[in-house]
Amino acid sequence: MNLSLYACPRCHRPLAGDALRLHCHECGFALTMSEGLWLDNTLAQPPGFSPDRREHLSDIERDHFWFGPRDHLLAKLAARELPRGGNALELGCGSGRLLPAWNTQFAQTFAVESYARSLAEAQARDARTTLVQADVTRLPFADNQFDTVLAFDVLEHAPADAMLGEARRVARDGARFLLSVPAFQSLWSYADVAAGHRCRYDLAQLRGELVANGWRLLGHTHYQFALFPVLWLSRRLLGERGQAAERRPSRVATALLGRINALEVGLGAGLRLPYGTSLMAWAEAV
């Protein structure tokens, strides 16, 4: 265990301890190992993502048309745009859908998540990852530790400067950052409100926030390019009825829409698609 990797998220002093407990001599902060997870029993749940929303996502992600092709696209982008080997940190890993891919690409993977139940699900999915209960705006890691940082549909839930600044603090100079956010404010709907989103992003806003926090944008693309017109019209014309159908589509619709997304990812993963419901970007620490 490399103790030099860890630092207090409150006062940034090094953490001391062993394989069962890490603690800060200065302020008393502690992480306790429990069933393979580093847990912070004092951590408050983030205001931008309710327990009910977490349960909803856990329920639908198994077969919703959005998740599977999106995961394949992110794995392809990572293989193309991020270095192999080294260590990687995923911020807000949720149930760990992408951890198996990261443990194939990187020598060592760490992931943080505020919900202990999500961490347990992530561990069941891939036990090779070091899993830590933490706030993405106050990370329990020392400066300049990671070669790669990953964050997928997390930034819209957190204060941008706090999260991006923390990501930069723990990243080494020249580290790469792959992230995704919901795209286009014109798609804003009740679903965004229920999910605790601050906003939906366009490229200019994301670039500005990255640059302000020590990152240089290297490239970007969008996901759900083909379905964008359908989903835009559904949200604009059908309102809550359309959003409900989008959240809980029929089996036939799920199969059809999932196939469209899969074809898009298969045929267009190397292209810079100009619009879609998700914006995906990669950046470098400067």
Image (tube, grey):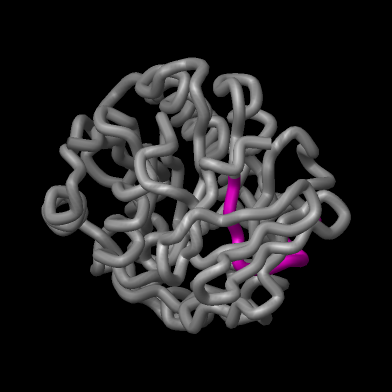
- The magenta stretch is 111-120
267 lies above or below 69: above
From the viewer's perspective, tell me whether residue 65 is left or right of residue 266.
right
Q: Is 280 above or below relative to 48?
A: above
Q: Is residue 225 visible?
A: no
Q: Position of residue 184 (x, y in %)?
A: 25, 60
Q: Residue at x 75, y 33 (%)?
A: 128
The quadrant the N terminus occupies is top right
Q: Quadrant of residue 24?
A: bottom right
Coordinates of residue 199 in the picture (x, y in percent):
30, 71
Looking at the image, the residue that sits furthest to the right is 35
Left or right, residue 210 beside residue 233: left
What residue lies at 75% left-to-right and 62% top-to-bottom? 32
Q: Is residue 274 above or below residue 91?
A: above
Residue at (16% x, 38% y) in the render? 216
285 on left or right of 267: left
Pick whichever, 2 or 54, lies toward us. 2
Q: Quadrant of residue 223?
A: top left
Q: Viewed as shown, does residue 151 lie left or right of 51?
A: left
Residue 4 location (% of width, % of height): 52, 41
Asked if residue 216 lies in the magenta stretch, the reply is: no
Instruction: Classify 109 as above or below 84.
Output: below
